[in-house]
Amino acid sequence: MSEKHFLYVADPMCSWCWGFSPVIDRIAETFGRTAPVRVMVGGLRPGTSRAMRDKDKDYVRNHWQHVHEASGQSFEFAFFDLDGFVYDTEPACRAVVTARKLDAAKALPFLAHLHRAFYVDNRNTADENELADIAQDFGFDREAFFETLTAPETREETQGDFWFAQQSGITGFPTLLAVEDKQARLVTAGFQTWENLEAPLAGWVAGSA
């Protein structure tokens, strides 16, 4: 029997990924026994060092509004009252890799937890100490999480995820691939509803499509 899985490439600070979060959770719940969801991070804005300017805030606020309208996901727009926020997504991506290293089964639910921490609770997911606090809230041991988060090999593994996304031609998130016997096919590059994906994914999992 052929081995199947889904490869989900996302970023914890990508608003469309937050919009897609209930859909990927539903995919994992529905098809996970036959085709588990494996999580990789794509790196939306890794290494950003400049604080957000007003025009940056306007651009991001517009995206958040579109995602809310398309998905119904909640956002706390008080975020845009913050001054000096540096939208570097590398630490949050590294936190997902950390969760994956500590317990691969928790990578997807922890990604959703990070999304909510940032978009609903306006927590600073670009800060390593805050990420360790968020991980503790989720159920990880804070000290073990922080140690893994800051380890050189975790940084390297995160960069490896970014490299994979780039080499695969993935330019936007969320991206979902269906993988069978090491052959990948694109399910979606961007947000989609469960209603649009349920039937074709059920067919692929069952081997009829």
Image (tube, rainbow, N blue to C red):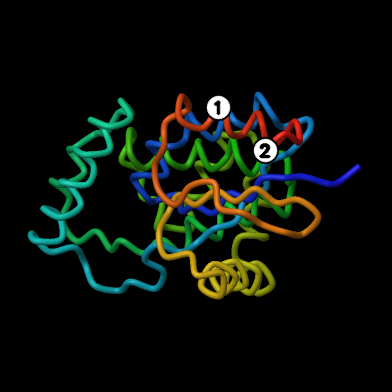
Mark 1 highlights which residue?
Answer: 198
Q: What residue type is labelled 2?
A: Ala
Q: Which mark is residue 209?
A: 2
Q: Residue at the spot x=21%, y=43% of the render?
A: 79
**Crowd rating for badge 1 (residues with CA inside 10 Å; few <14, some 14–19, many 20+):** some
* 33, above or below 102, in the image: above
- Whole-angstrom CA distance, mark 2 to mark 1, is 12 Å
* Quadrant location of the N terminus in the rendered image: top right
Q: Residue at the spot x=54%, y=67% of the render?
A: 165
| Residue 40 coordinates in the image, percent (x, y) | 60, 56
Mark 2: secondary structure: loop
| Residue 169 coordinates in the image, percent (x, y) | 50, 70
Mark 1: secondary structure: helix
Q: Residue at the spot x=60%, y=40% of the render?
A: 108
Outermost front residue: 208
Q: Which mark is residue 62?
A: none
How many numbered badges does the structure rendering display? 2
